[in-house]
Amino acid sequence: MREIMVEGCSPLPWATERDTRLSIMGMSLMPDPAYLMTMADGTIKQINPSTGTRVWTVPGRGSRPLTPPRRPDPRPVSDTDWTHGCAFCSARYLETPPEKARVVREGDQWRIIEHVPAEQLFDTVAEFRVVPNLFEIVSYDYWHENYGYELPRQLAEYKSEYLSTDQGRRHICAVQSAKLRQAGKSVEEIAAMGQDRLLAQADGFFGGGHDVVIARRHWVDGAATTADLAASGTLTPDEHEQYIKLTLHAMAGLYDANRYTRYVAVFQNWLKPAGASYDHLHKQLVAIDEHGANADQVAYRIRENPNFFNECGVNYALYHNLVVAENESAVAIAGFGHRYPTVEIFSKSAQIYPWLHTDAEVRGMSDIIHAVHAATGAEVPSNEEWHSAPVDVDVPMPWRINIKWRLSTVAGFEGDTKIYINTMSPQGIRHVVVQRLHELRASGRIADMAIGDECSGVPNPLRYHTYEV
């Protein structure tokens, strides 16, 4: 058996002569590439079309129910827990760096307020807020030392206004002192620095490239114990839309603030086993000066086949009965070739930059994301990974989001072979999520959408390749 290339896709190690691309009367017929192959014993071998990652699902585990790790024994939620449970809670605004923006609710209306002064932080209730990360992955100093980056005029003016008041200066000094203490500085060393030196190091709080989008609730309304955490899926569809919109607002802001940014990575780590510092709902955004390996791999594949994400993603899922949910703006599939059980969500929009999507397109994506989180459950550790086109690529890519369930630990076999054991098959993922979505829709907890076999079944639903780069 010789290795062959299926056009637009990676070499497939178990492909045969019959898998060559056919052309009949000018019409291209794409054969069934072996991204999914079931062996005689039931082992399901998978290849990820984008990354080439190889995954096996072994017999007897492909349709098992979600089994989240056991959490510590819960205790009753106290009166102070509601607002003081962690540094992200609503009574502790002054423990985070200066706020970039917040979403407030006034009746049925929502609005974004930018650059809230220290004196006004508690004048309104932030349903969601954007603050700089206290410990940046890519720091302000990185941009300053490597590129000569300085605060742009608008942010320099914001910093000057914030520091023009006693409360603003006290806030900055307190946060900077807390950061230095956690970095190992003694109280005496910090005191010796004085206010001027502390304030001089504050540029990263105003023009840094690592933001956090924080939800108001730590626990669900009416929580009986500390196990009743507020997660993406416990929000209402309207609340989740605002959460996504503020994240897009922050994403656009990071691109606008720093001309050297080539890509903004957006992700959500839910619960400590998935990498979260706090079990409080939040997303993170990190501006970087590279595309990242994933975007570069995807660009290569799209140059070979502009319709890659339809042919090797959504269409392939459709033909293998892996479509989970769909609405006018988005479609979700059970992913294949992932290290962890994964649901992939694709925007159908022709617009490749998510912050430029219409309100209807954002709402459609938000509803599907929210529904998948609700189906997953707040007890399951998960990562939500956003993928979109870097601002300087020469090919269009769709906005897409992977929601990964962190149900297993990568071990020696995976490290040795680079073949990953995924405890759930794509078919098992679809079964679990579709069943749960029907229950959630019937109870009114998610937005209306087509589920499972109700989905349209129309090939090539993604329109990203019509975008003019």
Image (cartoon, rainbow, N blue to C red):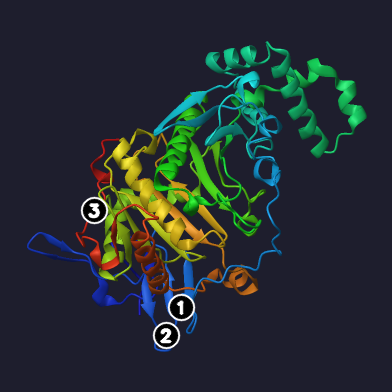
In the rendered structure, which amino acid carries the disc numbered 3?
Pro
Residue identifier under label 3: 461
- Residue in the picture at 85% in, 38% down: 184
Identify the element where label 2 is drawn: loop
Say whether residue 51 is visible: no
Disc 3 crowd rating (10 Å Cα; few below 14, some 14-19, many 20+) is: many
Image quadrant of residue 426?
bottom left
In the rendered structure, which amino acid carries the disc numbered 1?
Gly
Q: Earlier in the sequence, mark 3 or mark 1?
A: 1
Residue identifier under label 1: 62
> Would you say the residues marked 1 and 2 are in contact, meaning their CB atoms lie under 8 Å apart?
yes
Q: Earlier in the sequence, mark 1 or mark 2?
A: 2
Identify the element where label 1 is drawn: loop
Residue identifier under label 2: 42
Q: CA distance from mark 3 to mark 1?
A: 28 Å
Residue closest to the far bottom: 41
Q: Position of residue 164 (x, y in %)?
A: 68, 10
- Residue 265, compared with residue 123, is above or below; it is below
